[in-house]
Image (cartoon, rainbow, N blue to C red):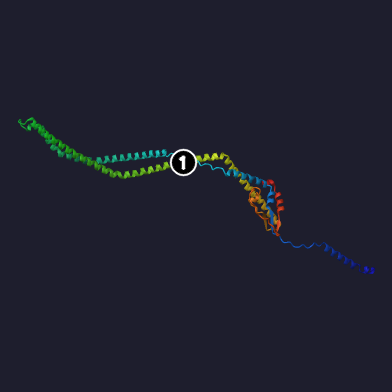
Amino acid sequence: MEKLWQTKRSEILAGGACLLVLLAVFLLMPEREVPMEEREIGTVRIAEVLAAHPSYERLKALRAEERTLTMLLRDLPKTPEIKPPETDPAPFEDSVWQKNAQVVISTRVELEREQKRLTEVYRKQTQADYEARKKAIDDEYLNAILNINLKIDNQRAMHGPQVSEEDLARERAVWERQRELLKEERGERQMELYRQWEAEINARVAARIEPQQAAWTKRAQETVDAQKAEAERMKTEVEQRSAQEMERARAAQEGKSAISARAMRLAAVRAEADALEAEIMRDIRSRAAKLALQHHLSLVLASPEADAMMLLSDTEAFAVRRYAPIIGTATVDLTAEMVREMERIEPAAAQ
């Protein structure tokens, strides 16, 4: 044995070293793990994540104030509509009547002035002819009347002394009656001539004045219509100004009222709450995307769905919530990591 050790010592040592190496490799080699199914979906319990956000309590307070203000304003009676007083049309109608009267009077004065002017023109143009025809009538009766006058003046010389005064008086009365009849006939013919002359003048004046009268009448009517439209416009403007003044007064009164203050506060609270809610959801989405990248996930689901009811779960006491948790062998729960991510958000930045 000693001889074998002395002759084969190097081979024995080499074999022992190999055995030790194999034993060490066998002992140190890790156990072969059974390959697990790859997970692609992450889940978070959204209520716990929301509660961990530093701005969530502020959001709850804003939504509570919003509901209170909404309830206070919901059943308020509608503000009574106040109609502006009706504008009295009498002043505007009087104004139109006065202006119309001025237009009518001025138009009539112009027409009468023009008519008189034309009448004088035509009268002067036909005066000589009229006088000539009038003199012709005088000449027709002049000799007859002159003869009667001569008879009356020379009656006594024409008769002898045997004719009594009574006979002379009766004869003179007959001649005087004949003379009066001749004068009356002459006057009637001259009056008829005058009427014909005036009719001719009036006809010529009318022929000239009618187109002008029609134009003036049309212009006067257009002026009257324009004045009526202007009066109506002024009345409408007065009514509109009255309505605007009343609306401004009502708006100013409402602006000072408690109802208006509540409505303005409700709008401000709602806007702030909406902005804060959007910021919270933006923080949750960004952190969920970060964890999805770290865990090589293709989808992160909220359990239950992150809706308005879930954001403020304790505000709707009578709301029935029905949802089932997401359970599966291919899902990974990220709630704890999301809570830690929410806790890392600085409160000042969250506000």
**Residue 161 % position (x, y):** 5, 30
**Residue 286 % position (x, y):** 67, 53
**Residue 345 % position (x, y):** 70, 49
**Residue 323 % position (x, y):** 66, 54
Q: Would you call the spot at circle 1 few (<14 residues within 10 Å), some (14-19), or many (20 or more)?
A: some
Q: Is residue 55 at least partly visible in the picture?
A: no
Most foreground residue, 325 or 218: 325
Residue located 88% across and 66% down the image: 16
Decide: is 286 above or below 185. below
> To which residue does mark 1 refer?
239
Q: Number of labelled discs?
A: 1
| Amino acid type, residue under disc 1 in the picture | Glu
Residue located 90% across and 67% down the image: 12
Most foreground residue, 160 or 138: 160
Which quadrant is the N terminus positioned in? bottom right
Q: Secondary structure at mark 1?
A: helix
Q: Is residue 285 left or right of residue 177?
A: right
Q: Is residue 273 at least partly visible in the picture?
A: yes
Residue located 83% across and 64% down the image: 26
Decide: is 340 above or below 20. above
Residue located farthest toward the right when viewing the structure as drawn = 2
Q: Is residue 220 left or right of residue 10?
A: left
Decide: is 303 above or below 91. below
